[in-house]
Image (spheres, rainbow, N blue to C red):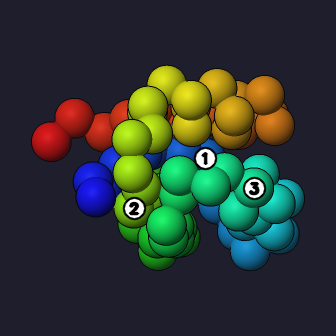
Amino acid sequence: MEILVFVTNVADVKAVRRVQPLLTAIPAIEDWNFDLEDCDHILRIVSNDLPASHVESLLQTAGFDCHELDY
């Protein structure tokens, strides 16, 4: 298991609802959540063997900014 952390512009519950079907459709994702209180609207994903670039592309295709956070 690994935890991927992303900076996004998913800023409210309505936007999370738009992203939810995209994230739940990926079998490699065990769990995910957004921290909407954080100024960077952090997305955390618990996964098995999921490239960060796949998540970035998925959200960007849906019209959101998404970049892996270097930590």
- The relative height of residue 35 versus residue 22 in the rendered view (above or below) is below
Circle 1 packing at 10 Å, graded few (<14), some (14-19), many (20+), is: some
Q: Nearer the viewer, mark 1 or mark 3?
A: 3
Q: Earlier in the sequence, mark 1 or mark 2?
A: 1
Q: Nearer the viewer, mark 1 or mark 2?
A: 2
Q: Are marks 1 and 2 in contact (CB under 8 Å)?
A: no
Kind of residue at disc 2: Val
Residue 38, visible in the rendered structure: yes
| Count of number-bearing discs | 3
Q: Nearer the viewer, residue 5 or 41?
A: 5
Residue to which mark 1 is pinned? 9
Label of residue 25 in the image = 3
Residue 19, visible in the rendered structure: no
Q: Nearer the viewer, residue 49 or 4?
A: 49
Horizontal side of residue 63 vs 32, given as left or right: right
Label of residue 46 in the image = 2
Q: Residue at x 54, y 45 (%)?
A: 8
Kind of residue at disc 1: Asn
Circle 2 packing at 10 Å, graded few (<14), some (14-19), many (20+), is: some
- Label 2 sits on a secondary structure element that is strand
Horizontal side of residue 17 vs 5, given as left or right: right
Horizontal side of residue 12 vs 9, given as left or right: right
Q: Earlier in the sequence, mark 1 or mark 3?
A: 1
Quadrant hosting residue 15: bottom right
Q: Residue at x 71, y 62 (%)?
A: 24
Label of residue 63 in the image = none
Q: Residue at x 39, y 41 (%)?
A: 49
Q: CA distance from mark 2 to mark 3?
A: 14 Å
